[in-house]
Amino acid sequence: MTEPPEIKQKAVAEAGPSLAQIAGRVLNRPLLLHPDKADLILHVLQGRIGIEPLQAITPETNRFVGTYRRANGSIGSMRVENGVAILPIVGSLVNRGAWIGASSGLVSYEGIAAQLREAVADPEVRAILLDIDSSGGEATGMFATAKLVAAVNKTKPVVAFVNDVAASAAYGIASAASEIIVSPTSMVGSIGVVLTHLDRSGELEDRGVKPTLIHAGAHKVDGHPFGPLSDAVRADLQAEVIKIYDQFVDLVAEGRTGRISADAIRATDARTYLGADAIAQCLADRMASLDEVIAALSQPPSGASPQRKGGPMTQTPQNEAQQGDVSAISPADLQSAVEVTRAEAHTAGVTAGKAEATARIKSIMTAPETEGREAQALVLALETEMTAADAAKVLAASPKTASATSIADRAAQEAELGAETPADHRNRSERNAAGWSKAITQANARFN
């Protein structure tokens, strides 16, 4: 009997990437990776030695905390404990792929972004905990992920818990959270960039192999492994590393604004720090255990009221004067006055709420970033209180919905040449209008 496609896909995912795939990701590419991790990877690739891991690290590391099942019966991609979504960032970081802390030891920026968007749209989630144990990984994709963390943090608090390493790219993601919490033995930092080149010419010579590179374009084979780097190629690669390093420093300084400056970050010279030393260097904020962090995030914000918006009502002197005369009003008249006032306040509140909600929803649904992401925009508009500006940032960082399942399908749906036709523009406008109409109908239903 033929196995179902989902079983085959699961088997492929569990098998993990091959050594050739890993080599393609780590050689001659700038990495935001702790040097010890880079050294281990190079030993595995160079000698192909067998290393038996003590234990495969997966998202189930915290299997005793929270549950994947939601109150409505659905199953989420991350555990939730008392309103706190626990998002694991465990293993080496790569840009693309379905890995989310898979047994291969890889976690993708794509997977992190998908979980962040899920947590924002989940009404059961009030806060997000980044549970980090990673030495870093690819530079490509980290910056967009950190920006998404910062955008989500404006709607729901995002806290990074280092359990037990947040180095390089992993620290870059953590720096965008509202707070970085460590244990006494947590290791953070390594704010730097590394690029590795392997010169295999001696190895090939011993084996009697002499490669010849035939190419067009002077820089087509820059960095090839069949000989040492020339001074010019080394200088080009160094310039690329410095450029990414500058961006990395600026990213951390922005995320840690008011706590550490760009100059202080550079002064660390990519060192790592443990526990209290990390706090002293302003690379972390405080110490706590995982249970303490979850317990704190599970509490409603101080001063919160049952109202959806606004703070607790304050009493004006006029109200106090009116309360002083209550004894002169009969109970029946007092009750009647209370009911009238309550009805008027409700009507005014509903009217104002509708106008405000309508304007916000319209801004989200008609934003340029919404095109191709209408379904997600609808969730952000109706199921969160995210501002239109923040929603635009989240949408911009999200992939557009695919309109076809294959290259042939997509080719059949596209015009061969030329700009967008009036009919194309009209169809897109009609789709946007339909989404806007649906949003208004659902919003009115909620307020009524």
Image: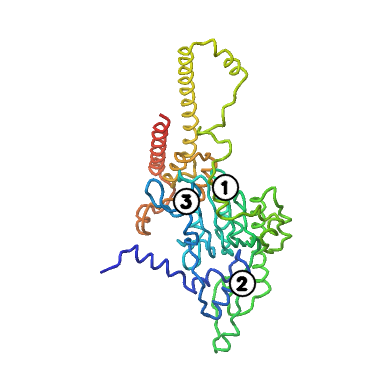
Label 3 secondary element? strand
- Mark 1 or 2 closer to N-term? 2
Q: Nearer the viewer, residue 53 or 399?
A: 53
Q: Position of residue 329 (x, y in %)?
A: 51, 11
Determine whether 327 is above or below 194 in the image.
Answer: above
Determine whether 401 is above or below 363 in the image.
Answer: below
Residue occupying image coordinates x 58% and y 74% = 40
Front position among marks 1 and 3: 1
Q: Position of residue 416 (x, y in %)?
A: 39, 54
Residue indicated by mark 2: 196
Q: Quadrant of the N terminus?
A: bottom left
Q: Residue 80 has which mark?
A: 3
Q: Are marks 1 and 3 in contact (CB under 8 Å)?
A: no
Label 2 secondary element? loop
Q: Quadrant of the C terminus?
A: top left
* Mark 3: amino acid: Val
